[in-house]
Image: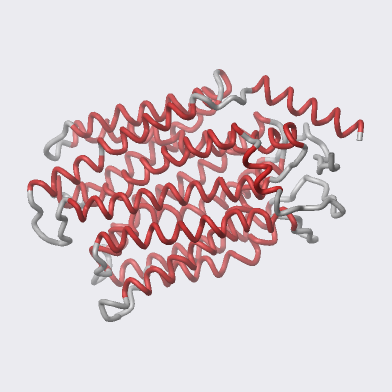
């Protein structure tokens, strides 16, 4: 068995300053990720003038590319050895290109109709690549800062609060800010420029704020076949990833459809910002609750409880047939409480699968696991965009026009019933996740014993 990297002190706590510094990196990431999730499909169809099925196809193609680049980036980051560490250099050098490409994605230049999909695809691929370069190493830092499961949960709490804050800014502020400009094209370009600037800046703050606490063993060999070994022998990671893909796909469909739902079905586009605020304010407020539940029960139980609550709240929204704030606001508050777990639970669970790999086959490969984990996130977003784009095309959706009754019912179903079905499948998968606090402690103990014996 190869000698593995070990923590200099596996029991040390992380300072509050480090937790905040690490957390703002996810605020940066979500300024980009949530803008794409919530607004990019709408921007492509209603602002840039790309047909909905073509826009959905662009989402799918971008994630095929992520399927290639994400695992490669994880493998590269595992092999990296610099004076800044294994993961941090990518935050330093990737932050500015990511922010710039994000701005260009929403620039909406005056192009002929046949070139617009080409422009959209090229810059979407560049944004996806920049996001990969920065956020796979960023995510893998969680497993590099502490091996204590509960400390990871607390660190994840800070990180996810910042993630939800970024989501809240995007969900609640974007449309009102765009409305201040003479046209949506100008508004999207300016706001994307602002978000891109802060995404780059906050990523650099994270680079400065954190230090990796794993000793680097430069003599250790990193083989390409480790990618297959680490994934196929990690049943908890496979279960978690598949369940997360389903849940994030459901949430992505909700996020992508909410603007269409209010603009066309309920005929009050301005209420979309209120609904998104209800969702993400309650999601942020509910984080301490899910941290407590995950500690009292386990992370798997907290995940499934939250997603079950989300499914129930969507059922209530489905029953609404006209704008009724007295019903919609409480329903979207419950939606946010449920969605809070998709921010917290998988991110708190994934580091434990790193130890599982080390315990099971003697290979600690955070980069590989996080590469596939982030690919799963983006694959879910791609499926969501593709499903929404193709679904809108199938029901006869026409942008900025009066919709048929069939199209309106299709928008309603895609916003509610389709995500509910996907969530139920995700809950069933996550039920098979095997790692709890007892098993995690056993894994750490046996890893430590092997290290001492080596």
Q: Is residue 312 above or below residue 180?
A: above
Q: Position of residue 451 (x, y in %)?
A: 87, 34
**292 and 2: which is toward the camera:** 2
> In the visual, does 273 lie left or right of 74?
left
Q: Position of residue 270 (x, y in %)?
A: 21, 51
Q: Is residue 13 above or below residue 406?
A: above
Q: How many marks?
A: 0
Q: Which residue is most to the right? A: 453
> In the visual, does 83 lie left or right of 441?
right
Q: Residue at x 84, y 39 (%)?
A: 1
Q: Is residue 341 above or below residue 26?
A: above
Q: Residue at x 22, y 34 (%)?
A: 317
Query: Which quadrant holds residue 35?
Result: bottom left
Q: Residue at x 53, y 66 (%)?
A: 98
Query: Which quadrant holds residue 442?
Result: top right
**187 and 396: which is toward the camera:** 396
The chosen color scheme is secondary structure
> In the visual, does 290 lie left or right of 351?
left
> In the visual, does 1 lie left or right of 233?
right
Q: Quadrant of the C terminus?
A: top right
Q: Residue at x 62, y 39 (%)?
A: 232
Q: Position of residue 414 (x, y in %)?
A: 24, 43
Query: Which quadrant holds residue 187?
Result: bottom left
Q: Position of residue 117 (x, y in %)?
A: 33, 71
């Amino acid at each position: 068995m190869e000698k593995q990297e070990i923590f200099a002190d596996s029991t040390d706590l992380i300072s509050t300053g480090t937790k905040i510094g690490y957390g703002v990196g996810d605020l940066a990431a979500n300024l980009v990720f949530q803008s794409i999730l919530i607004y990019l499909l709408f921007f492509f169809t209603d602002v840039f003038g790309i047909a909905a099925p073509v826009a959905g196809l662009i989402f799918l193609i971008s994630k095929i590319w992520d399927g290639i680049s994400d695992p490669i980036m994880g493998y590269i980051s595992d092999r990296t050895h610099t004076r800044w560490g294994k993961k941090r250099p990518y935050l330093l050098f990737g932050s500015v290109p990511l922010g710039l490409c994000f701005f260009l994605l929403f620039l909406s230049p005056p192009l002929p109709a046949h070139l617009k999909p080409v422009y959209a695809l090229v810059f979407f691929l560049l944004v996806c690549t920049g996001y990969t370069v920065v956020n796979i190493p960023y995510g893998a830092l969680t497993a590099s800062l502490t091996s204590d499961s509960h400390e990871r949960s607390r660190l994840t709490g800070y990180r996810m609060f910042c993630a939800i804050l970024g989501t809240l800014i995007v969900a609640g502020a974007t449309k009102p800010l765009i409305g201040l400009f003479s046209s949506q094209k100008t508004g999207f370009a300016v706001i994307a420029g602002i978000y891109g600037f802060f995404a780059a800046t906050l990523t650099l703050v994270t680079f400065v704020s954190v230090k990796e606490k794993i000793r680097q063993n430069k003599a250790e060999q990193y083989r390409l076949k480790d990618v297959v070994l680490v994934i196929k022998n990690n049943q908890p990671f496979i279960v978690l990833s598949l369940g997360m893909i389903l849940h994030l796909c459901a949430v992505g469909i909700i996020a992508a459809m909410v603007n269409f739902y209010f603009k066309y079905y309920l005929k009050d586009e301005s209420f979309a910002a209120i609904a998104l605020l209800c969702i993400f304010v309650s999601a942020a407020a509910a984080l301490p609750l899910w941290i407590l539940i995950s500690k009292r029960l386990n992370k798997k139980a907290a995940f499934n409880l939250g997603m079950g609550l989300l499914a129930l709240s969507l059922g209530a929204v489905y029953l609404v047939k006209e704008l009724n704030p007295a019903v919609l606001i409480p329903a979207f508050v419950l939606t946010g409480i449920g969605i809070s777990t998709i921010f917290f639970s998988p991110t708190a669970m994934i580091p434990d699968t790193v130890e599982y790999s080390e315990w099971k086959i003697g290979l600690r490969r955070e980069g590989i696991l996080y590469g596939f984990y982030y690919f799963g996130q983006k694959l879910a977003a791609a499926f969501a965009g593709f499903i929404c784009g193709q679904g809108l095309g199938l029901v006869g959706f026409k942008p900025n026009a009066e919709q048929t009754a069939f199209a309106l019912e299709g928008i309603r179903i895609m916003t509610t019933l389709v995500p509910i079905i996907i969530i139920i499948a995700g809950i069933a998968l996550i039920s098979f996740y095997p790692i709890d606090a007892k098993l995690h402690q056993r894994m750490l103990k046996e890893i430590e014993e092997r290290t001492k014996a080596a």
